[in-house]
């Protein structure tokens, strides 16, 4: 039972995570609002704890001398998603509250680029995360990225976030803002801490799926990732269309609208 993409074990894992998401939605959809949000936050905190444990377990493992803290600050995009899911699962948009202006952009960032990044990692993990038994610490890598996908979709299915097509495109703006912040952190780390620091793969794709293709075509650090914007835009729009389609089917099946939270 080895965790490698497109094997029976990996397929069963993905089906189990899909089942978990459906079960979580089914249990919470009729629960009181506070219970819903506490449950979602609990799962998000557990996800963050697993991510943190996995990272430090590898840093402290003498068998992996190249996995060091100076290259693994919580600045990789998927790690940021894991952290941001904790407040995102609790806070709701509130038009009457001026200070909550950041809530919807946060939900948008996590539903679109955040979930998509987790999904892509599940299909193209680095070689070091493959060919190991399912009951191994490395499986936490798959579990964390899967929950990065599941939680935003359950959150949206419960009506706390209603994705719009313009949100899909706006999410690229929020993603670019995050990327600029991470680039500043990366440049600082490379200049003063560790010249091999490579957050969000700005300086080396490190075997990450489509980034390897772009690196082979362009080969210029940072700039080689720019084509991701036109590539991802139609994918994000498709994600929104799929969500609306599933929501419409659910309404038709229940013959009543889903409970929604005002945006």
Image: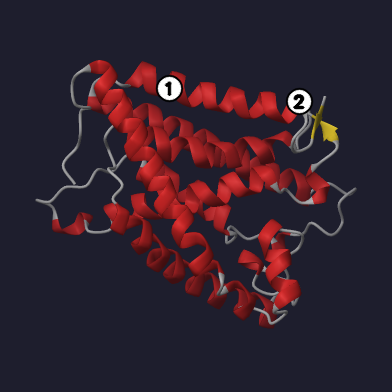
Q: Where residue 4 appears, x then y in whole percent?
A: 79, 37
Q: Where residue 111 appears, x then y in whole percent?
A: 41, 47
Residue at point 18% right, 21% down?
Answer: 256
Tell me the distance, in whole angstroms, between the alpha carbons under discs 1 and 2.
24 Å
Which color scheme is applied?
secondary structure
What is the number of the mark on residue 36?
none
Residue at point 68% right, 83% down?
Answer: 191
Q: Where residue 22 appears, x then y in whole percent?
A: 45, 22
Tell me the SS state at disc 2: helix
Observer-nearest residue: 185 or 229?
A: 229
Observer-nearest residue: 108 or 218?
A: 218
What is the number of the mark on residue 8?
2
Extreme residue toward the left, this view: 96
| Left or right: 257 as drawn, with respect to 96 | right
Q: In what quadrant of the picture does the N terminus appear? A: top right
* 8 over 93 or under it: above or below: above
Quadrant of the image occupied by residue 209: bottom right
Residue at point 65% right, 75% down?
Answer: 189
Q: Which residue is mark 1?
A: 24
Residue 30 at least partly seen: no
Q: How many marks?
A: 2
Q: How packed is label 2: few (under 14 Cα within 10 Å), some, or many (20 or more)?
A: few
């Amino acid at each position: 039972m080895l965790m490698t993409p497109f094997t029976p074990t990996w397929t069963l894992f993905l089906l189990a995570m899909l089942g978990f998401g459906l079960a979580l939605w089914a249990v919470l959809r009729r629960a009181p609002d506070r219970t819903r949000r506490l449950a979602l936050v609990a799962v998000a905190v557990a996800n963050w704890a697993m991510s943190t444990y996995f990272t430090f377990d590898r840093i402290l493992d003498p068998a992996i001398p190249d996995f060091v803290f100076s290259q693994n600050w919580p600045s990789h995009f998927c790690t940021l998603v894991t952290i941001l899911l904790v407040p995102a699962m609790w806070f709701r948009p509130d038009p009457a509250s001026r200070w909550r202006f950041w809530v919807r952009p946060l939900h948008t960032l996590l539903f679109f680029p955040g979930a998509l990044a987790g999904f892509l990692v599940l299909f193209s993990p680095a070689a070091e995360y493959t060919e190991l038994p399912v009951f191994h610490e490395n499986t936490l890598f798959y579990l964390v990225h899967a929950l990065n996908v599941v939680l935003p979709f359950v959150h949206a299915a419960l009506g706390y976030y209603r994705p719009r097509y313009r949100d899909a495109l706006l999410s690229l703006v929020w993603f670019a803002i995050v990327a600029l912040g991470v680039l500043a952190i990366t440049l600082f780390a490379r200049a003063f801490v560790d010249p091999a620091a490579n957050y969000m793969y700005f300086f080396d794709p490190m075997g990450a799926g489509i980034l390897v293709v772009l690196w082979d075509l362009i080969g210029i650090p940072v700039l080689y990732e720019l084509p991701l914007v036109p590539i991802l835009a139609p994918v994000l729009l498709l994600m929104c269309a799929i969500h609306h389609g599933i929501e419409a089917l659910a309404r038709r099946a229940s013959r009543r609208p889903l409970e929604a939270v005002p945006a």
